[in-house]
Image (cartoon, helix red, strand yellow):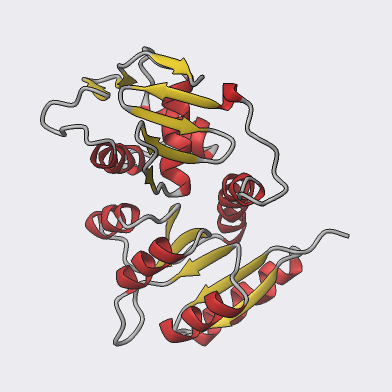
Amino acid sequence: MTTPHHLAVLDDEIDITRLLGHYLQGHGFRVSQLHRGADLMALMAQDPPSLVLLDLGLPGEDGFAIARQLREHWHCGLVIVTGRGDAVDKVVGLEVGADDYVTKPFDLRELLARIKAVLRRVEPAAAAAPSSAAAPHDATTRLRFAQWELDLAARRLSDLAGRDVPLTTGEFELLSAFVRQPGRVLSRDQLLEQTRGRPAGAFDRTIDVQVGRLRRKLDDNAEDPQIIKSVRGAGYILVPAVSTAS
């Protein structure tokens, strides 16, 4: 039997954590129900979950700060589940590294589908974690563009001096889509389908936010980008040639 995924639900509303706990356990997950940021940090140190469902509106706590702490110290899926539906909050949530952003009230079936989609993206990274017994990566998984190298198997971005640049799951998936299709204009819908398995909504800025984050990490000037360029009315394109690392 496979070990069930461990999920953490952090929300100050006990009714919400109970609802999600009961529903997700019924779909084969192991669920930890938490109500304070300190409880989540203790859990991350002792029994880290594969994915965290995080409410931003915790009394006396900064949900965005908790999200940043998760991204700085742990590799796990992160879905913000909150009553804060303002577009600015959503952009900030994605900026700090959330893999998805769901507003309350939510449909349980849709939330489950989003959780499974994030887990599918997170799982390969866990499987690719380095170990002493690991075999060398096939060179074809290491692709170079501009002054960067992306190792698709290890899910690692580094400069040509070998210095690693950490990527969130969503950033890695997006950059992978670009390096596999250099010189091709990719629409927001195509990028969302390829990285998240869903079409873009009318006001969905997920891809725009993640492109902005990638540009900063790639030292690509947002005012005059040379790596990931915007194509007005069409989407984005990776401009540099991509080659296989020797």
Residue 16 in picture, x, y percent from top left: 53, 78
Q: Quadrant of the N terminus?
A: bottom right
The residue under the point 12% across, 26% down is 224
| Location of residue 218 in the rendering, given as x and y in whole percent from the top left corner | 28, 36
Task: Name the quadrant containing residue 85.
Answer: bottom left
In this rendering, is residue 85 above or below 163?
below
- Residue 159 visible? The answer is yes
Seen in the picture, residue 4 relative to 194 is either above or below; the reply is below
User: Please, which residue is most extreme toward the right here?
Assistant: 1
Residue 133 appears left or right of 46: right
Q: Give the residue displayed 33% in from the left and 20% down from the top.
A: 238
Give the x, y percent position of residue 123.
Answer: 63, 49
| Depicted 173 relative to depicted 36: above or below | above
Number of labels in the image equals 0
Q: Residue at x 57, y 27 (%)?
A: 141
Identity of the residue furthest to the left in this view = 223
Relative height, residue 7 to residue 177 (above, below): below
Q: Which residue corresponds to the image point at 51% horizontal and 83% vertical from the top-left?
A: 42
Q: Quadrant of residue 188?
A: top left
* Residue 103 visible to an observer of this rendering: no
* Residue 79 as seen in the image, left or right of residue 224: right
User: Which image quarter: residue 174?
Assistant: top left
Image x and y of residue 237, in percent? 32, 20
Q: Report whether 137 appears left or right of 42.
A: right
